[in-house]
Image (cartoon, grey):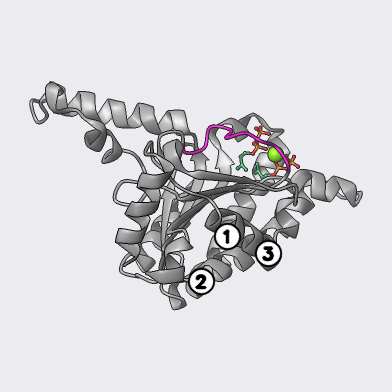
Amino acid sequence: MGAGARLPRHIAIVMDGNGRWAQRRGLPRTAGHRAGVEAVRRTVEGCRRRGIAVLTLFAFSSENWRRPRAEVRVLMDLFTQTLGSEVARLHEHGIRVRFVGERRDFGPALHRRMAEAEELTRDNRAMDLVLAVGYGGRWDIAQAARRIAAEAADGRLDPSAVDEEAVAGRLSLAGLPDPDLFIRTGGERRISNFLLWHLAYTELHFTDTLWPDFDEGDLEAALADYAGRQRRFGRTGEQAEALEKAQGA
Ligand code: IPE
Ligand code: IPE
Ligand code: MG
């Protein structure tokens, strides 16, 4: 592993600050969302180039439905358009796309694009790109609980066998490693109902950079911050160091 051991396998990003980026320029908030697409492109490419295995991007939360209807409409149109124009390139780069969140609330055009993107890229292995749209950490835990309850009621699952693995296996990110590094742009120090279960031991990095300005330098800074952390998972510093040495050998 060597130096590579210090690279996160999974990065999860709350892409915040689009509205303020636009407002500072005297533009409508939606101009910030458009500018944010370019930062998504840069970041996906930067992570793929570095060999990051999984990138999860928070694009629209379950609470973002509370925004003005016009802003929500622009965002939905932007997702639909961007998927249409970007998926071929993601596929060329060997990226597998997965959407997580409550899809029921999306229109048919977006639904179709999401299904097409997942289908087209399903066998790709260069990187997993998880797009959280209409996602909420509490929603995710609730839908996993619903599935567990249904399986138990059907007799397919023994209630006493419901452990952490059983819950994790029914969450939207099942099969992927938990995020090692969480990044939030835009200056707020909060989770905003992102991956509540999965962030249990994730290293948190906050930056004041607004999402449309997030570039290679910001990604490098986040990775450097991460590389300097000691991940102890409840152990002592000495134990963690010994374990890291043994694994890195
Ligand atoms: C993040 O930027 C994008 C979405 C939540 C869809 P914001 O739109 O929240 O930007 P600010 O926080 O208002 O600046
Ligand atoms: C979090 O940003 C959600 C996304 C970036 C998609 P918000 O701007 O919605 O977060 P709050 O409401 O300020 O916590
Ligand atoms: Mg915001």
Q: Please identify, in this view, whether the residue under mark 2 or under mark 1 is nearer the observer.
A: 1
Q: Which residues, given as a range, are shown in magenta?
A: 187-195
Pointer 3 and pointer 1: residues touching (CB < 8 Å)? no
**Residue occupying image coordinates x 49% and y 34%:** 136
Left or right of 92? Residue 221 is right
> Predominant secondary structure in magenta?
loop
Residue 38 image label:
3
Which class describes the residues within 10 Å of circle 3: few (<14), some (14-19), or many (20+)? Answer: some
**Residues at marks 2 and 1, CA–CA distance in whole angstroms:** 11 Å
Name the spot of residue 48 as percent of width and height, x first.
Answer: 49, 70
- Quadrant of the frame with the C terminus: bottom left
Three-letter amino acid code at the position of disc 2: Arg
Q: Residue 127 occupies which quadrant of the picture?
A: bottom left
View quadrant of ligand 2: top right
Let me know if residue 6 is in the magenta part.
no
Q: Is residue 244 above or below residue 153?
A: below
Q: Which residue is mark 1?
A: 223
